Image (cartoon, rainbow, N blue to C red):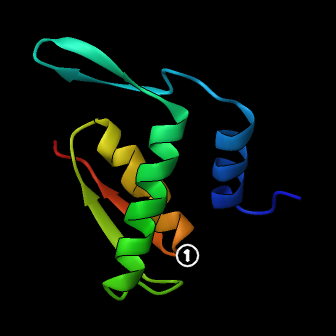
Amino acid sequence: MVETLSQLFLHSCRTYHKDDLLSAKRDGRYVPISTAEVETRVRNLSAGLRELGLRPGDKVVIFSENRPEWVITDFAVLCAGGATVPISTT
């Protein structure tokens, strides 16, 4: 049973495979990022944040333009038990 946002994200990655969950502009064209790649990056970043000392309940500020790394970081923090505090670049 899915009870948290991080569980919902991981369940969705396993259930709804997409070749183009996100896309990023590289060398003037948009390149797709698959569900599997996003999940791998979220899991790796989440583990890295925990290794660096992020604990459940800690807050992490995200100061970024709209980009795939913003989404990946947001879910990685949630998967580590933290909470994100987004700050707009404007």
The part of the image, by quadrant, that contains residue 58 is bottom left
Image quarter where the N terminus lies is: bottom right
Q: Is residue 84 visible?
A: no
Amino acid type at mark 1:
Gly
Query: Can you say whether 26 is above or below 67 in the image?
Result: above
Residue 13, image x and y in percent?
A: 64, 41
- Residue plotted at (33% across, 47% down): 70
Q: Nearer the viewer, residue 85 or 12?
A: 12
Which residue in the protein does label 1 denote? 81
Image quadrant in which the C terminus is located? top left
Residue 40 vertical placement versus 29 (above, below)? below
Residue found 49% across the figure and 75% down from its top: 82
Q: SS of the residue at dot 1?
A: loop
Residue 7: image quadrant is: bottom right
**Is 33 located above or below residue 89 in the figure?**
above
Give the side of residue 27 with respect to residue 52, left or right.
left
